[in-house]
Amino acid sequence: MDVLALSRLQFAVATYFHFLFVPLTLGLSMLVAIMETQYVRTGDEDYKRMTKFWGKLFLINFAVGIVTGITLEFQFGTNWSRYSAYVGDIFGSLLAIEATAAFFLESTFIAVWYFGWDKLSKKSHAVTIWLVAIASNISAFWILVANAWMQHPVGYALRNGRAELSDFLAVITQRFAILEFIHTLGGAYLTAGFFVLGTSAWHLLRKHETAFFKKSFRIAAAWTLIFALFEIAQGHMNAEILGKAQPTKLAAMEAHWETGRNVPMNLIAWPDAKNERNTVQSLSVPSGLSLMATYSTAGEVKGLKDYPASERPPVLPVFLSFRAMVGLAFLFLAVGLYAWLKREQIESRTGFLRVLPWLIPLPYLANELGWTLAELGRQPWIVYGLMKTSDAVSPIALSQVGTSLVAFFLVYALLGAVDFYLLFKFARKGPEAAPAVVK
């Protein structure tokens, strides 16, 4: 392997690992804020215990996510210095805003929330967790805007051999960035919903703190159903924008080779990139792909053959990632709907309760598949249509990248083991005992 391949592998390892923690942090921050708001509104001590229990799991996950995110950003200087030199005026400013505005707000108020239980009024304390949740989501916004600019560069001018920022508003308001942001949030919220559902199911099955975990389950069931519906509906919007901004990615997602109109959607297919065709192709929905991509059955959809082989993404992994992600989305909808319909008598649905904890990893998998689709589907470009990945890598020795890759892998494995051990330990332990009632 050369420096480019190893650098790509190292960045992939760092990104995949970091994104194991980000979605749960984003989703749990919102759910914990909702639970504490319920405590303030009703005075029910169970909601206070819920806030503390799920909040502890949120804090564990948050801490590891921060560490892995910092090392990820350093790679832009170490492994991708040519990229940083070329687009740093744009990309760097977005990451700087994320760090100085959102991250510091989030970090400050998470400390106030954790240490302020008996020092602030109920309402003031609830405000602090809402500030944490909002700041976490704002932090995600700036990072995703930076990624969206790599997917669809706007608001820049080429000067002195560099891409320089010319229209900041265009960068942060472009439709590609907004859609990427809300789609990623939807996946994060589903991850938290399944985490709460699965953990609650484990305790309900053992009849431990039944009233407590039934309340948690009801909140998570409604939350999961809402965002399962949202992800499916919003995901369709992404296809339309890809048809305009990244036609090669859309074509790879659907294994679509020939440009045409009234293009069908093949529910079953298997791409053969070498021979530029599909070896299997059946269960076609007439004009389905045209309708999805253009909102018109007669709409034109570009095929992969319109582009040189060197400018196409790797078709099979992009195709499979998309198919698996869509399949999981409909599974999430079915689980969310059943959980919501049976929420009042859920403790009697023992078969469903046994299955739910095993489903917790699936939203994590869906999120990773989404990033695989987004990043592999952009190749061979690091900035789509502007800079190729092969031109962005740092001029460093192969041994340097190999050594750092091994170090990253070992450190991340240790961090991951600690995080999942602590989550498992405290999730199984359950909440603190309810305060004794003084008669």
Image: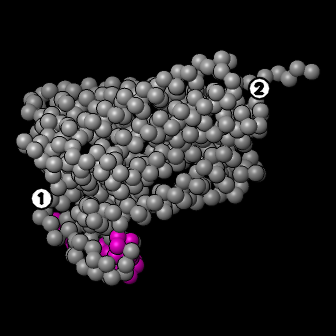
Q: What is the number of the mark on residue 88? A: none
Q: Amino acid at mark 2?
A: Ala
Quick check: is 371 in the magenta stretch?
no
Q: Nearer the viewer, residue 335 or 39?
A: 39
Q: Amino acid at mark 1?
A: Ser
Magenta residues span: 274-294
Helix, strand or loop at label 1? It is helix
Q: Are marks 2 and 1 in contact (CB under 8 Å)?
A: no
Q: Say which quadrant the C terminus sits in.
A: top right
Q: Quadrant of residue 64?
A: top left
Left or right position of 300 against 161: right
| Residue ID at (20%, 37%) | 88
| Residue ID at (34%, 34%) | 97
| Residue ID at (28%, 40%) | 12
Q: What is the number of the mark on residue 434? A: 2
Residue 8 in view here: no
Q: Answer with mark 2 or mark 1, whichever residue precedes in sequence.
A: 1
In the rendered view, tell whether residue 247 sits above or below residue 162: below
| Residue ID at (12%, 47%) | 158
The percent coordinates of residue 338 (x first, y second) are: 65, 58
Left or right position of 338 against 373: right
Left or right position of 146 against 120: left
Q: Quadrant of residue 302?
A: bottom left
The percent coordinates of residue 165 (x first, y second) are: 21, 43
